[in-house]
Structure formats: C-alpha cells, structure tokens
Image (cartoon, rainbow, N blue to C red):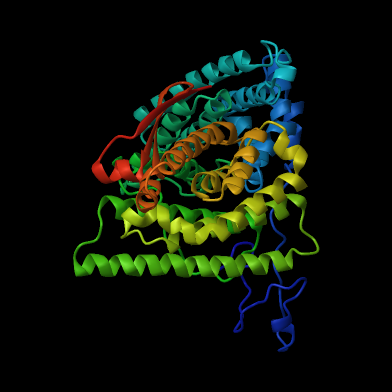
Amino acid sequence: MPPNTKPRRIRKVKCDEAKPHCTRCTSTGRKCDGYSPPPSRTPSPSSTALMERPDLFKSVAEKRSFSFFQSRASTQLAGQFHMLFWSNEVLQAAIHYPSVRHLVIALGSAYEWFENRAPRCANAADSSGGMQFAMQQSNHAIRYMGDVFSLQGADGQSIERICCILTASILFTYLASLQGNLLQAIQHVRSGLRVLQDFESMDHFSGPRSPSYPVPVLRLRTLLISIYGQVRTMINDESLLKWHHDPLISHLEPVSYFMSVDEAHGYVERLFHNLQAFLQATERFPPRTIEELTAFASRRKQLRSALTDSCEALDLLATRYQSGKSANESSGIIILRLYHILIDIRLEIDPLKPASRETAFDNLQDRLEKILTYCEHLVEENNTVYRTPSCTSGLGIVLPLHTVAARSRNPQRRRRALDLLLSIDRRECLWDSILTGRIATKTMEIEEHAHSAAMAHRLEDQAQELDHARVREVKIEFTEEKKVLLQYVTVGDWKVGRRGTQHVIEW
C-alpha cells in the first residue's frame, strides 16, 4: 500500500490520485476515499513549546542556540527533502534525551558560526555563540552518550538506545561537517553504520520494533546511508571496507507514482546508491563466467528499468504539483532530474570497457550541458539561498556540477561549472562546493597543460596523448582535520599502474 493512503481503500482499478477524488474511480461508479494529506512540513506544536521548558536549558546561551537551531538551522539542514527529521523529530528527541539536546544546541551554535564565518562577518560570532561553545556542548553530549553505551552493555540491546546512538551519529557528522572536519565526519558515519548493521544482524533481538523514540529507525538508516553514499562517491577505495552487507545495496521495487517529493527523493537516492555499488563491484570484480555475465546484464537492465520508472513517476508528480507546489518542492524536483541524468550517463557507459570510459563521455556532452543549465537555473531562481553559506542534507547540486567540471570537453562549459561551484558557498554534508571546485580546477589544469604539450607534437600522436592525459579518477585521502591528499590518476597512469600526480589542499 502506498504511503499516506487510507488502509481500508480497496480498488479494482488503479487510482489516478486526482484530488479530492480519483476520476478513474468516480467515473466507474466507485466511491473514492482519496488520499490522506501529506505530512506537515512545519514543526509540531510540541516542538514549538520546547522553548517554554526552562528545565531543558542550563543557561541563556544554551536556550539561545537551541532557538537558533529551531528557527533557522533546522530548515537549512533539511534542504529540500528532510524537513520532518530536522524540524520535528530531532526536536522531539531533544526533550527526552540529553545527548540529543546538547547536540542540537551545539549544531545551533555551530550553524550560526558557519553562516557568519565569511570575511565580512569574521568577528560576528563570539565565544558563547560560536564554535567554542558548540564544542563545549558536544563534550556534554559525549558524556551523556557514555551513559547510553554503558546501559547497552549492562542491559543488552535496546532499539530505543540504538535509535539514540544513530541520531547522535548523524548529528555528530553534521557538526563535524560544519567545522570543516570532513575526516571526523566520515568516521562518525562509519561508526553509526556499524552500530546499525550489528543491530540488524541480531537474530535474537526480541524488543519492540516500533518504540516510542521520536525518530523511526528506518529514517535514521536512510540518513546514515545517504551520507555514506557521499563517502563512496568521493573515495572509490571505500568500497574495499568489509561490512555485513554493502550498505548501498537495497531492494528497488517497481514504482509507478510518487506521493511526494520526499518519497521521490528516497527512491532516486536508493537508485543512485545501487548503481554506485554495482559499478564499483564490477570494476573490482569484472564478470568472467557465463553466469556472472548473465547476472551483470540482468542487474544493469534492472537499474535501467528502475530509472525509466522513476523518470515517469517524477513527471507525473511534477504535473500534479504544477499549480500548487512550493519553491522548495520545485527545487527538489529539479535536483531529482539532475540525478536522473547522472544515472542515465553512468548507465550509458559500458563498465566492461574501463579503458574507454573517459572517451565515452564525448558522446554525452549534451547531457552535461543539460545538468549545468538546470544548476544555473536553480541558483538564479534561489539566489539568496545559494549565495548564503549553507549546509544541507539530501541530494544537491555539488556532485552534478563536479561531473560537468571534470568530464566536459567544452572549455567554456567547464569554466561555467567551475565558476558556479566556486561562487556558491554550499556544503551538502560532505560535498563542499568550494573544495570540490578547487579539486576540479586542478583536473582542468592537468588536462589543459597536456593539451598544450600535445599541440607541439606530430598530429598522428596528438589524439592518443590527449586521451591518455584525461583524468580518470581523483583518489582522495583525508589525512588531517582540514587537509586532503589527492592523486590525479590519468588514463595513461591507470593503464601502467602509476599513482598519478599528487596534490594537497588545506582549508
């Protein structure tokens, strides 16, 4: 049964979801119960009433930072797709769980510092409202989490405590992201996933599956895997880590419609993750036998079919929302279209021909232009949102823009993508627009330098030299809090097993 449908509705024909009653039902004489309204995207009254609970805060500074999280940071962190978690459920958890409450306070303080850290406002955040206060609150949260882990060891596994630990992992991850400490953020999400997988692998667990904890374990799982998907996209070797099962692989059920932009986001993100896992597994373990090749072809076909279904379902959703969608929903639909194009590009390139992967992008330049046009439109229509320093969750525009900047063969298009990345101050959890722009700028410099050198050689040698000079992969290793070691591996490097050109970026 689709989400938000009323449980007693039984139909012999497919509902067309028209409001208030389905035309297909009423035209055939059936009574249509319609659909329940989608969940509210605004905080519940109980979360608003939090500020009237003086017992929750030990100081004016704590109350102030909590208020900033509730009124400002939660909306920004939610982005287009996770309003329910950030603006409602986390606040509900903060009432009863001190570790979550102190992390919410820390995030409020850290987010205010993050927004005001630009040179023009460098002195805006004092010690009570800046990162120093956030770290103090983080330390309080760590002490309370120690009690949670102690109870886990003494009393055994509890789904309520597991949910509290997973919530803390997510909040710690975003706190580290706001600090710019991406190495620590990655460590937090890995730790949270290990807790989740250990819990899910316990056959003997007999506790309640639907506890009173405000955040469902399924949502926590989705949010953790969402961040881990970014890790896997950034760090290809991350796929070498051992898990109970690959976190990115999940069941992709056939889909014919989406009830909301949030539901569409969940499906598109799962599709993107499944594709990422498929491509990385194929590169590490290319199919050899007839059985393996058959399984490979079947999986690729399944992913293509899921993309087709998802595109059609998103088109239907956009049509239904045409007259009544909010600016947030409009932006969300465009972002999902961006990822549809990214998935389509990856499915077009044959993973069984890795040596020709980069040249395959030459036939897909029109799709890169479409991605860039969508991104430019988003920034133009939401100029204040994208030009203000922001940190968000869910799918966004940084990865699509990086794809254009790194894979476009048109110098003007490449520079448009780079200019856009470097002009917005946007951090989509681990994907930072400015850091990503600096990484892609080095890619462009390596390839343009090789192009200039090739022009001095014989014409018949130029094509091969240019192909070999294309950057195939950038290996990323976060070595310190705000330092990354990069290896730019060209096609030529990859073919002979060279490590590539090293480059260090600090921020």
Residue 356, quarter of picture: bottom left
Residue extending farthest left = 289
423 left or right of 177 in image: right
340 left or right of 250 in image: right
Q: Residue 459: where, in percent of width, then height?
A: 39, 51
| Viewer-nearest residue: 165 or 440 | 440
Residue extending farthest right = 323
| Viewer-nearest residue: 320 or 482 | 482
Q: Residue 364: where, in percent of width, then height?
A: 51, 60
What is the quadrant of the N terminus in the image?
bottom right
- x 69%, y 54%: residue: 39
Asked if 414 appears above or below 171 in the picture, the reply is below
- x 62%, y 72%: residue: 8
Q: Residue 411: where, in percent of width, then height?
A: 57, 46
Q: How many marks?
A: 0
Asked if 64 appears above or below 4 in the picture, the reply is above
- x 75%, y 75%: residue: 21
Asked if 73 appears above or below 254 in the picture, the reply is above
> From where the camera sits, is residue 5 visible?
no
| Viewer-nearest residue: 5 or 318 | 318
Residue extending farthest top = 127
> From where the camera sits, is residue 428 visible?
yes
398 left or right of 87 in image: left
- x 67%, y 76%: residue: 16
Q: Residue 264: where, in percent of width, then height?
A: 59, 59
